[in-house]
Amino acid sequence: MSESVGNNPFSIKDCDLAEIATGRRAQNLRELRDNLVKVDKSSIFHHFWGGLMRPRFVEPEFNNDFAAWANHALHDMPLAERLGVIDPTDFKSLDDLRQELIEVIEERLDESAWVPWAKPDQQFHFMRAQTIVFDTRQRIEDPRELARVAPRLSLGSVFYHFIDARTRDPIGADDFRAWLLGFDGQYEALCRRLAAIEPFFDSLVQLRKHLTRAFQEFFGG
């Protein structure tokens, strides 16, 4: 369930991700497709969103692990580009996202007379992540405090409350909107602005800046 729904204080959490092997791997494009059919959807979430929590020394060319593998292991740039433009926020569910991945790969398989293979040491390993949550013990009573707190949020807090929250019931939205919606419609305009923030093609640092700007401009802070 999303954090701090209604007029309860907003409880700021931090998090880290522990990668866990699923035991599934692929060495060619057909094996990737076959595993995508069966793998738990939490793995698909991780391979699209987990990269946000990894240290980035250079800006990655592709924002999801499937596209990056198609590029560096299969050396299939057309496929990498098609996978790379997939935005997971365009899909209502992870199962819909899974189906899009499968269709893109099957289309590429139909185009090629041969199946691209990766070297033995460049297999795609399907991983999932266990989210480890930490309570910062920081509570927000008044939504106006968000303007002050947002610039100081850790990147783990941004991920937990703005990305990971989308997988949680009841509304599948970020925790900030889930909380603000409990104030009898006072913050509908702010919620619309938060909903318009594109989370996938930005870094967590950039997302924190977008959140800070939204809160400070709305509350005049």
Image (spheres, rainbow, N blue to C red):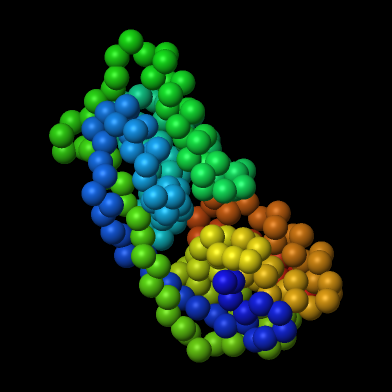
* Quadrant into which the C terminus falls: bottom right
Question: Taking 116 as reference, is 189 above or below it?
Answer: below
- Quick check: 194 left or right of 162? right
Q: Choose between 122 and 41: the one closer to the eye.
A: 41
Quarter-of-image position of residue 42: bottom left
At 32% across and 65% down in the image, what residue appears? 18
Quadrant of the image for the N terminus? bottom right
Q: Position of residue 118 (x, y in %)?
A: 23, 30
Q: In the image, what residue occupies the spot 33% across and 38% down?
A: 35
- Find the residue positioned furthest to the front: 38
Do we see residue 208 in this rendering? no
Residue 117 in view? yes
Where 103 sits versus 55, above or below?
above
Horizontal side of 217 relative to 119 (left or right) equals right
Of residues 63 and 26, the one drawn nearer to the viewer in this rendering: 26
Task: Indicate left or right for 56 with 149 as reference.
Answer: left
Is 111 or 150 nearer to us in this picture?
A: 111
In the displayed structure, would residue 10 be above or below residue 71?
below
Q: Name the spot of residue 19 as percent of width and height, x first.
A: 30, 60
